[in-house]
Image (cartoon, rainbow, N blue to C red):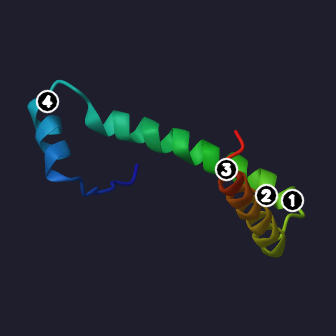
Amino acid sequence: MPTMTLSVPNDLYDIIKSHKEIKWSEIARRAMWEYAIKLNLLDKILEKSEFTEKDAMEMDKIIKRSLREHYETGVS
């Protein structure tokens, strides 16, 4: 199995070091697997999608316009 080195903030490192009874590499491995599975699912969904970047930009404009109008009129 390949080895990976991670950089973590000092605060996190202090907590990890104070709990030597925990298998931190196993926790990291599981968290990465969970994230990788979600990414894999997203990739599969996007493979079939016909939604383009141009479509996303248009939707962005519509949403922002709608939000602006909502807050300008004060409608709840």
Residue at x 13%, y 30% (from the top left corner): 20
Q: Which residue is mark 2?
A: 46
Q: Does residue 12 lie above or below 58 as drawn?
A: above
Position in image of residue 37 (x %, y %): 61, 43
Give the Cα distance between marks 4 and 2.
Answer: 41 Å
Front disc: 3 or 1: 1
Give the Cα distance between marks 2 and 1.
Answer: 5 Å
Q: Which residue is mark 4?
A: 20
Q: What's under tag 1, amino acid-wise?
A: Ser
The kind of secondary structure element at disc 2 is helix
Q: What's under tag 2, amino acid-wise?
A: Leu
Name the quadrant containing residue 52: bottom right
Task: Give the mark nearest the N terminus, 3 or 1.
Answer: 3
Front disc: 3 or 2: 2
Q: How many residues crowd around disc 4 within 10 Å: few (fewer than 14), some, or many (20 or more)? A: few
Give the Cα distance between marks 3 and 4.
Answer: 32 Å
Q: What's under tag 4, amino acid-wise?
A: Lys
The kind of secondary structure element at disc 1 is loop
Front disc: 4 or 2: 2
Position in image of residue 61 (x %, y %): 76, 68
Front disc: 1 or 4: 1
Where does the C terminus fall, quadrant-wise?
top right
Answer left or right for 60 relative to 35.
right
Looking at the picture, tell me which residue is in the foreground, 6 or 51.
51
Q: Which residue is mark 3?
A: 40
Q: How many residues crowd around disc 3 within 10 Å: few (fewer than 14), some, or many (20 or more)? A: few
Looking at the picture, tell me which residue is in the foreground, 52 or 8.
52
Name the quadrant containing residue 72: bottom right
